[in-house]
Image: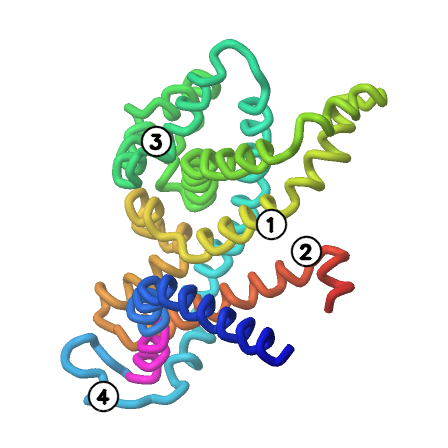
Amino acid sequence: MAFAITQRRKQWVKNGMTIFLFLLPALAVYFTYTLAGIIRTFYYSVFNWSGIGPASQAANVGLGNYVKLMGDAGFWHALQNNILLVIVSIVFQLSFGMILALILNTSFRGVRALRTIYFMPLLLSTVATGTIWLMLYAPYTGLFDGLLKIISPNVPLSWLGSEQVVMPAVMFVICWQYTPQYMILLRAGMTGIPDELYEAATIDGASRWQQFWRMTLPLLSGTIKTSAVLSIVGSLKYFDLIWIMTLGGPNGYSELMATFMYKKAFNEDRMGYASTVASCMVIISFVVIGIFRYMTRSKEETNHD
C-alpha cells in the first residue's frame, strides 16, 4: 500500500514538472513583458517624471499624481467615454455577432461566401479601416455627407467635427470592425451544440424562437461571458481608431483613457502622470471585470462558493 502511494506521488510530481516545463516559456514571456511592465508602471506613477533620464532622479510625489488625476476633468470625461464604449460594444457587437452567427449556422447556398464577407472588416488593419472611414465621413466629398444632403439638404453636419456626433460616428466604425470577432466566437460555440437536441426539440413542437431562448442561449452562456469579458477589456483600453480618426477631438469629446494617457506621455512629456493614468486603467479594468464576473455567476458557481 505504501509502495503504491509512493509511486503515485512520484508520478504526480513527474506530471507536475512536465506541465511546468511546458508552461515555463509562456510564463517567462508573460512575467517579462506583461507583469513586469504593470509593476514598473505603478512604480513610475509616484514620480514627477518627464520620461528623460532615470525615474529615480525625478521628484517622488507619492500619491500626488493620483490626487491630481482625481481632480482632472479631462480624465473623467475620457472614463465616461470608455464606459459608454463598453456598453455600446456589449449591446451591439454581441447582439449583431449573435445574429450573424445564427445566419452562418444555417445551411443555404452562398453561406461560405457570406462567412468570408462578414469576416472581412476584422482582416483589415486598423490604419486602413480608419483611413477608409475618414474618407466616408469627409465633409462635402464623403458618402455619408452626400446621403445626408439628399435626405436633408439644409442641415450641415461634420461627422467627426461635431461634439455631439463624433462619438456615435466612431463607435459605429468600432462596432463594424469588431462584430465579426464575436460572430466567429459564437459560431464556434454553436458548433459544439449537438444537432440531436434541436431534432428532439422540433419533434416536441418547439419553434425556432423557443429553441433559441431555451437551448441555444443557455448552452452558449460560457461563450457569451468570454466574449463580454473580451469586449469590456478591449473597450477600456481602446486606442487605435479613435487616435487615427479624431485624435481625441474635437475639444476632447472623443477622448478615451488611452488617448488621454498618450497625450500626457508624448505630447506633454509627463510620463509619470501618464503612468498614473495607465495604473488607474489597470485598476478600473480589474474592478469592472470583477463586478461583471460577480453579477454573471451561475448557480453552480454560487453553490460551490
Residues at badges 1 and 3 in contact (C-beta under 8 Å)?
no
Where residue 225 is drawn, which disc sits there? 1
- Residue at mark 1 to residue at mark 2: CA–CA distance: 8 Å
Q: Quadrant of the N terminus?
A: bottom right
Q: Which residues are magenta?
A: 38-47
Q: Is residue 204 above or below residue 41?
A: above
Question: Looking at the picture, which amino acid does disc 3 mark?
Answer: Tyr
Q: Secondary structure at mark 3?
A: helix
100 left or right of 207 in image = left
Per the image, the residue denoted by label 2 is: 296
Q: Is residue 43 above or below residue 204?
A: below
- The residue under the point 40% across, 72% down is 279
Question: Closest to the observer: 58 or 107?
Answer: 107
Q: Which of the two discs, 4 and 1, labels the residue nearer the N terminus?
A: 4
Residues at badges 4 and 1 in contact (C-beta under 8 Å)?
no
Residues at badges 1 and 2 in contact (C-beta under 8 Å)?
yes
- Residue at mark 3 to residue at mark 2: CA–CA distance: 38 Å
Q: Which of the two discs, 3 and 4, labels the residue nearer the N terminus?
A: 4
Question: Looking at the picture, which amino acid does disc 4 mark?
Answer: Ser
Q: Quadrant of the C terminus?
A: bottom right
Where residue 137 is drawn, which disc sits there? 3
Question: Looking at the picture, which amino acid does disc 2 mark?
Answer: Thr
- Residue at mark 4 to residue at mark 1: CA–CA distance: 42 Å
